[in-house]
């Protein structure tokens, strides 16, 4: 099977993007101070998080597969993460 | 019991996964008024599993489950694989008895859960998809807070009992104070691709006929030494292929989870299974791996917690279970709620029977039996050195290089001496494994 990048893999999924509301918010100071930033970049299977050259973490919430791994590894206060509003986000057809 | 507002339903179930649907179905069958709320656009849209459902419990709920439900293949071949970079040692267990009666099937949850929700609807439950429950409504009761309903956006819906079936992250159980944040060694992340292949190709590659299926479980190089494993399950015309890695080990070793997954897919002994396949879907899921230690409070005034939300998953090294435990917990919850509603008492005391029923059933019994499995599976040696040792012993046996042969025991001793493993570790792990698994 051809190796695919994570963004290419995500194009196979169906998403209902919530254009009005992100369900993820990073507290940059706490994320940096606690190492949460690097940890969530590494553990997210959808590559939602990217470390920018200035050390801040950017968030591509539209790619989120809603597993909750980032929240589990995040230090208290570093990350606000909840499920997208009803009907939005990834919609699995296989599962 | 005084009610400030007349409840809208007898039971509200949060989450149309396996636990939520089975509980809603059984309560609707009892003639209760049931609302099943699902945040996905349709039931199943948010749900994902590795793919093997041990189906006997489900067949007790739905006698025609295997004929009616959209299941993929009946598992008749269990292939347990120690994988090294350049070698692989496996137990290949095939058994016709596993097909009659059927013991396990592969499933794809978007399809299965849609079917389950349709059964709930047939039985009289009201399904509300596309709605996220934000929190439970509580009132001050005699024994602390009492759950009286749910809030979803601006809507408040009231019920005599709420069932939290909202999955492994269970914000509902956490908000209600029933579950705390789990330690990282009790959590793992699963990453999975569903890969389309012609059914004849699957049957040829896995040596299957008809609707037979294979479950391949892999430990070792597939996770680059991180605690966890890989899997490969056959569906009718696709494969579910993935890894599951423990979060404490993943973060400690500073590995990138997608690098591990890519490494597994590209492994010389895994890639041939996937050759020519086309990716259908890419997903991931948090997995509770703490076993017995993760089950906390699962009942309070007006609410029960079931399935993944209650921490009911079990990794015994050979079998990885969750969906069958979800079924069992839902059955116990529906029975308990039925008798509580009959007595018009849904207090914590009246719902306490849930825990007793759960622990009298296969769910609680098995959680207890395998209580030591999680810490045994945290032993690092499982994920690298044992696989290499097994392969070296076999290499010493099969590689006839015209040198005089040595007895197997001698080959094994030499391989052990050359490996970082010590005899006392081998003995210790052997005893611990025998006790834990």
Image: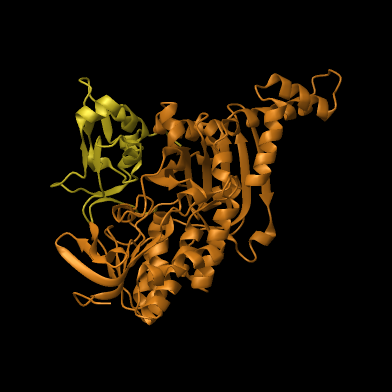
Chain colours: A yellow, B orange
The image position of residue B298, as x and y in percent, is: 41, 59
Q: Is residue B399 visible?
A: no
Tell me: residue B27, above or below residue B402: below
B58 or A82, nearer to the observer: A82
Q: Residue at x 69, y 38 (%)?
A: B430
Tell me: residue B340, above or below residue B376: below
The image position of residue B286, as x and y in percent, is: 40, 45
The image position of residue B55, as x and y in percent, is: 54, 63
Q: Please give the count of numbered marks on the rendered protein.
A: 0
The image position of residue A65, as x and y in percent, is: 32, 45
Horizontal side, residue B165 vs residue B103: left or right = left
Which quarter shows the N terminus of chain B? bottom left
Q: Is residue B430 visible?
A: yes
Tell me: residue A26, above or below residue B4: above
Horizontal side, residue B433 vs residue B280: left or right = right
B233 or B320, nearer to the observer: B320
* Residue that sits furthest to the top in the current view: B403
Q: Quadrant of residue B105?
A: bottom right
A42 or B268, nearer to the observer: A42
Q: Quadrant of residue B403?
A: top right
Horizontal side, residue B269 vs residue B396: left or right = left
Q: Residue at x 86, y 19 (%)?
A: B404
Tell me: residue B123, above or below residue A35: below
Q: Residue at x 27, y 33 (%)?
A: A49
Q: Quadrant of residue A33?
A: top left
Horizontal side, residue B288 vs residue B99: left or right = left
């Amino acid at each position: 099977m051809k190796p695919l990048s994570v963004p290419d893999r995500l194009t196979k999924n169906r998403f209902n993007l919530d254009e009005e509301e992100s369900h993820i918010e990073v507290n940059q100071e706490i994320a940096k101070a606690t190492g949460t930033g690097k940890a969530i970049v590494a553990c997210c299977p959808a590559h939602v998080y990217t470390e920018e050259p200035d050390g801040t973490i950017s968030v591509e919430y539209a790619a989120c597969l809603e597993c909750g791994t980032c929240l589990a590894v995040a230090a208290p206060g570093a990350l606000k993460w909840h499920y997208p509003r009803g009907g939005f986000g990834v919609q699995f057809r296989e599962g | 019991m005084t009610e400030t507002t007349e409840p809208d339903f007898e039971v509200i179930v949060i989450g149309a996964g396996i636990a939520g649907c089975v509980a809603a179905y059984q309560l609707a069958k009892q003639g209760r008024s049931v609302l099943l709320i699902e945040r996905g656009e349709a039931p199943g849209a948010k749900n994902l599993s590795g793919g093997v459902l041990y189906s006997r419990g489900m067949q007790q709920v739905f006698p025609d489950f295997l004929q009616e439900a959209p299941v993929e293949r009946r598992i008749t071949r269990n292939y347990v694989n120690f994988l090294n970079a350049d070698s692989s040692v496996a137990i290949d267990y095939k058994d016709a008895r596993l097909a009659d009666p059927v013991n396990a099937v592969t499933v794809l949850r978007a399809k299965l859960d849609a079917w389950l929700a349709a059964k709930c609807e047939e039985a009289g439950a009201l399904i509300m998809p596309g709605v996220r429950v934000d929190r439970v409504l509580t009132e001050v009761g005699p024994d602390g807070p009492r759950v009286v309903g749910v809030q979803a956006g601006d809507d408040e819906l009231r019920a005599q009992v709420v069932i939290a079936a909202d999955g492994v992250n269970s914000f509902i159980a956490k908000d209600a104070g029933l579950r705390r944040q789990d330690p990282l060694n009790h959590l793992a992340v699963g990453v999975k691709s569903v890969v389309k292949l012609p059914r004849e190709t699957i049957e040829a590659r896995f040596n299957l006929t008809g609707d037979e299926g294979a479950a391949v479980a892999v430990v070792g190089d597939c996770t680059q030494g991180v605690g966890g494993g890989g899997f490969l399950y056959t569906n009718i015309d696709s494969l579910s292929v993935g890894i599951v890695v423990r979060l404490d080990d993943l973060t400690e070793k500073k590995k990138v989870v997608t690098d591990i997954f890519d490494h597994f897919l590209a492994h010389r002994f895994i890639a041939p299974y996937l050759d020519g396949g086309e990716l259908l879907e890419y997903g991931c899921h948090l997995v509770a791996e703490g076993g017995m230690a993760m089950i906390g409070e699962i009942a309070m005034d007006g609410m029960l917690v079931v399935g993944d939300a209650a921490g009911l998953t079990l990794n015994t090294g050979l079998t990885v279970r969750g969906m069958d435990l979800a079924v069992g917990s839902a059955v116990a919850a529906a029975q308990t709620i039925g008798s509580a509603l009959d007595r018009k008492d849904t207090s914590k005391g009246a719902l306490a029977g849930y825990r007793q029923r759960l622990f009298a059933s296969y769910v609680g019994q098995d959680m207890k039996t395998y209580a030591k499995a999680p810490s045994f599976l945290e032993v690092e040696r499982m994920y690298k050195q044992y696989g290499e040792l097994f392969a070296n012993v076999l290499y010493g046996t099969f590689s006839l290089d015209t040198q005089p042969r040595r007895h197997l025991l001698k080959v094994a001793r030499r391989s052990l001496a050359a490996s970082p493993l010590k005899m006392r570790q081998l003995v210790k792990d052997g005893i611990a494994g025998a006790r834990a698994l």
